Image (cartoon, rainbow, N blue to C red):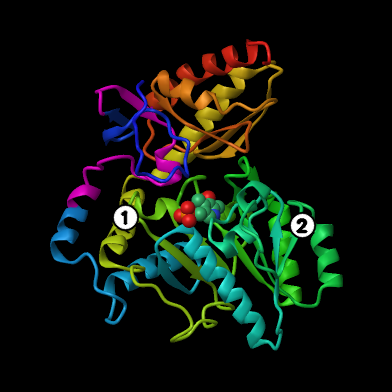
């Protein structure tokens, strides 16, 4: 692998020294013709893999008709995608934007205005240790990772932080802080290392939010859109949020974000309160509509659940009794393997072995493959990754 000199690109990322040229399904090829199995899917974005045979012609047709119109005109494709998202979630309406942080930013604005509408001048929002909500000033302030925040203070105020899965901590906040208006968390923390909210915890939060008149806001930017085997991860807990930001997998690669709202939050924003130039454009809406349609036609939720369980079982077998592997966790095709030591170098080693993965929270190997992943491809991921992990753990610590 040769490093690519990129003197004109701002160095906000440490990049692997390969450049990808094209892909098909769960395979991608670099500019030198080497093939890789893609277990990352552009960080949970390429729901349908690469160059999907039904998505590509639909997007080509859309580009030939309209890419962008502005939000000055009636938007039938927005209505179509919003109707689908509300039907799948049991919520009421949707606002469209272009990314995860924008969806979260909209959610935070909804929470604050919901408070102001109730006479709370300085509304507060409960957020979590280990959370990740994006890189804008407000969303990095809500994020529970000092590395993301370092150098960008002063942070936005109005957040109260609690540990995950500790209902007593939230009850304590309820007793002591009268200005709280919302609870904001990822149903399953992604960047934080694939850490799930316990289902009973979400149910208890739902009850508490109802009793307090708070909004329950579930960031499903990474865990939503079928990744865990349900349309939205919170559906495993049989609860319904008031506000649900979405992005990543919704457009299968075309930038898109959405904030989907239930009754309590659906009328908080009105004309003039919020806006976006690109958000809801016909190309992104078509990508969302076709992604959800193909997911349904090809039963990709079932596939995510089944192949995910196969992967988890295989890793459990491979790593049974291996002291350096602390935990294998996840749901569907959102899987984390936590090691007992930092392992960022596994990224490059996997890449050299022809496998694209991610490492998050320093020591968690993260797999987020396309939801079309086949059994054979899942087995191949294990075949490549398991020996790499064993070798890595066998080497004496530096
Ligand atoms: C990726 C992510 C975001 C931020 O999305 P961007 O599109 O990068 O702004 C927010 N929340 C969660 C849970 C994410 O995984």
The numbered disc on residue 6 is: none
Dot 2, crowdedness within 10 Å: few (<14), some or many (≥20)?
A: some
Where is residue 96 drawn, in percent x and y? 40, 68
In the image, residue 266 sits, relative to residue 328, either above or below, namely below
Kindly report the distance in space between the C-alpha atoms of the residues bearing marks 1 and 2: 38 Å
Q: Nearer the viewer, residue 251 or 132?
A: 132
As drawn, the residue found furthest toward the left would be 64
Q: Is residue 160 left or right of residue 364?
A: right
Residue that label 1 marks: 293
Q: Is residue 101 a member of the stretch shown in magenta?
A: no
- Residue sitting at x 30%, y 35%: 25
x, y percent for residue 339: 66, 26
> Does residue 245 appear left or right of residue 67 in this picture?
right
Residue 379 screen position, x and y as percent: 44, 22
Residue 162's disc number = 2
Point 29% across, 67% down: residue:
281
Q: Which residues are magenta?
A: 31-57
Q: Is residue 59 above or below residue 155?
A: above
């Amino acid at each position: 692998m040769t490093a690519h000199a990129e003197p004109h690109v701002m160095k906000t990322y440490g990049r692997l020294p390969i450049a990808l040229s094209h892909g098909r399904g769960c395979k991608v090829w670099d500019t030198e013709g080497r093939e890789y199995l893609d277990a990352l899917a552009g960080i949970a974005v390429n729901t349908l893999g690469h160059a999907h045979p039904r998505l590509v012609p639909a997007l080509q047709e859309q580009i030939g008709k309209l890419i962008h119109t502005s939000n000055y005109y009636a938007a039938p494709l927005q209505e179509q995608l919003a109707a689908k998202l509300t039907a799948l979630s049991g919520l009421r309406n949707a606002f469209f934007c272009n990314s995860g942080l924008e969806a979260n930013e909209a959610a935070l604005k909804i929470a604050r205005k919901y408070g102001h509408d109730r006479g709370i001048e300085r509304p507060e929002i409960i957020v979590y240790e280990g959370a990740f909500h994006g890189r804008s000033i407000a969303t990095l302030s809500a994020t529970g990772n000092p590395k993301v925040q370092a150098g960008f203070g002063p942070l936005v105020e109005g957040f109260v932080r609690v540990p995950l899965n500790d209902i007593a901590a939230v009850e304590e906040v309820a007793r002591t802080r009268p200005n709280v208006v919302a609870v904001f968390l990822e149903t399953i923390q992604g960047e934080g290392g694939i850490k799930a909210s316990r289902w009973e915890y979400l149910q208890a939060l739902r009850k508490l939010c109802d009793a307090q008149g708070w909004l329950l806001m579930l960031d499903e930017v990474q865990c939503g859109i079928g990744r865990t085997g349900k349309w939205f991860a919170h559906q495993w807990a049989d609860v319904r949020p008031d506000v649900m930001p979405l992005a990543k997998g919704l457009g299968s690669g075309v930038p898109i974000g959405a904030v989907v709202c239930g009754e309590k939050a659906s009328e908080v924003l009105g004309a003039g309160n919020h806006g976006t130039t690109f958000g809801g454009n016909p190309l992104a809406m078509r990508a969302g509509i076709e992604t959800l349609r193909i997911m349904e036609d090809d039963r990709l939720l079932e596939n995510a659940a089944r192949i995910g369980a196969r992967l988890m079982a295989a890793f459990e077998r491979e790593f049974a009794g291996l002291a350096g592997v602390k935990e294998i966790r996840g749901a569907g095709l959102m899987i984390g393997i936590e090691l007992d030591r930092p392992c960022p170098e596994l990224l490059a080693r996997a890449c050299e072995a022809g496998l694209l993965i991610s490492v998050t929270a320093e020591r968690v190997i993260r797999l987020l493959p396309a939801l079309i992943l086949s059994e054979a491809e899942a087995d191949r991921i294990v075949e490549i990754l398991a020996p790499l992990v064993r070798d890595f753990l066998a080497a004496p610590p530096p």
